[in-house]
Image (cartoon, grey):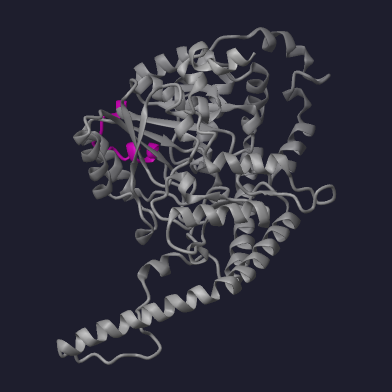
Amino acid sequence: MVYIAANQTQLLSKIATGNGHGEDSPYFDGWKAYETDPFHTTENPQGVIQMGLAENQLSFELVQQWIMNNPKASICTAEGVGEFMDIAIFQDYHGLPKFRNAVAKFMGKARGNRVTFDPDRIVMSGGATGAHEMTAFCLADPGDAFLVPTPYYPGFDRDLRWRTGVQLLPVVCESNNNFKVTREALEAAYKKAREANIRVKGLLITNPSNPLGTILDRETLRSLVRFINEKSIHLICDEIYAATVFSQPDFISIAEILAEGIECNHDLIHIVYSLSKDLGFPGFRVGIVYSYNDAVVSCARKMSSFGLVSTQTQHLIASMLSDDEFVERFIAESANRLAKRYRLFTRGLAKLGIGCLNSNAGLFLWMDLHSLLKDQTFAAEMALWKVIINEVKLNVSPGSSFHCSEPGWFRVCFANMDDSTVEIALTRISTFVAQNMEAMAPLRKQRRQKDLRLSFSFRRLDDIMKSPCKMSPHSPIPQSPLVKTRTC
């Protein structure tokens, strides 16, 4: 046994012995901390509250009520067992036609019925994870790269890189413009890749964004399409949070941009979708690749045999999503509940003096704790995160695990718990902030004195240059515009 353990690298593949899955990330470490000490209102009230998992649990009773009212939708009920054999033996990897039709229709409804989707372009996969990997296999070879605006979902490092050998190259976005994707940032990332002799095969975006909870505006989407068209690279649009938009402005799908007639090679455009976030069904593993490229549709459909959605699930989903009245009610009510939860959480944070990026979608918010860092470094961010998870007992995800370019940001999921747990979480944050402010008071005093000395130094320089400006004793340093963007 000792001999085998010592020679695992020789006995197993590089994938098996490597760390390409990315489980050593603090993003996944937070999950492990929760799993070893999970919060429960009565059985473990001092446990870790899970705020690192983006699940939509706010509207489950609507789904449960529909299932009770439609027992025939399941082949495991007395009313639906008549279709058991036909569903159980169906194994065409195209999927049940009624399933593809229903998903295409739902995708349109989730986008305000402003666009339609062709069921024949629906390719199913085992969740968005499988859909992303399948897309990467279809578009790129080992060593090729996709550009990805930061911050981005940590799971992409696993989904697109681990088994495909593809690289992910960051497009650095910053808080001074609310992390918007600019043409300049895209060009810089593309140029850097070319200088390193890395072949860029595509650009991957998430819209709505995970972790920001923001949506891309129409002009930004047009700019992205023009960029990939000029470079002749692919555009992969992860739209798995499309129906989680809970306030204005409305979500704009890449499909709407194409429908405008923008000059673009449609073969370069691909959408990844799932039912994990919009409906809250991550356990059903329903992932979708929707490509405008016939060759990609054909290849992906063949590859989907490695991760099909069970026909039992297809059958149930087809029945549910074909009920127009239910779908419209669910989308509207889910948005209302997400908006209410977002307001509850952000207002609670604001009372504590904690800001967050202004957002209107997703199951999370992008919280700004840079003022609680001992210094503005990622090492200080990790030190703060360890305190939050080990002492405050909240699993929030540090921005560095999302490849954020600036320390101090944290993703906080708010839709996977009830209202009472939210209140407990806010109480824990309140206690922590109060203690932290007291402990950091001497350090902040030192910083103010340093800033004041710096201010006087600049004043002496102004005097030398005979500046007519007068110094305000209350505002030695003007407020940075960055601070304004960090308020909820």
| Residue sitting nearer the eye, 336 or 400 | 400
Q: Residue at x 48, y 79 (%)?
A: 445
What segment is highlighted magenta in the picture? 254-267
Q: Quadrant of the N terminus?
A: top right
Q: Nearer the viewer, residue 189 or 88?
A: 189
- Horizontally, residue 230 falls left or right of residue 300, namely left
Q: Residue at x 41, y 24 (%)?
A: 135
Residue 2 at x, y = what percent?
62, 16
Tell me: 333 left or right of 137: right
Residue in the picture at 23% in, 36% down: 263
Residue 422 relative to residue 242: left or right? right
Q: Residue furthest front?
A: 2
Q: Is residue 400 above or below residue 162?
A: below
Question: Does 20 appear above or below 210?
Answer: above
Residue 437 visible in image:
yes
What is the quadrant of residue 64 in the picture?
top right
The one of 215 and 366 positioned closer to us in this rendering:
366
Image coords of residue 340 (percent x, y): 63, 58
Taking the spot 50% from the left edge, 33% from the top edge, the residue there is 22
What is the number of callouts on the image?
Answer: 0
119 or 18, which is in the foreground?
Answer: 18
From the top left corner, tell me how far across and down residue 227 is, in percent: 24, 40
> Does residue 384 belong to the magenta stretch?
no
Work out whether 435 lies above or below 83.
below
* Extreme residue in the left direction: 465
- The spot of residue 308 in percent (x, y) is 57, 17
Residue 246 in sight from this viewpoint: no
Residue 116 as seen in the image, left or right of residue 78: left
- 458 up-or-down from 325: above or below: below
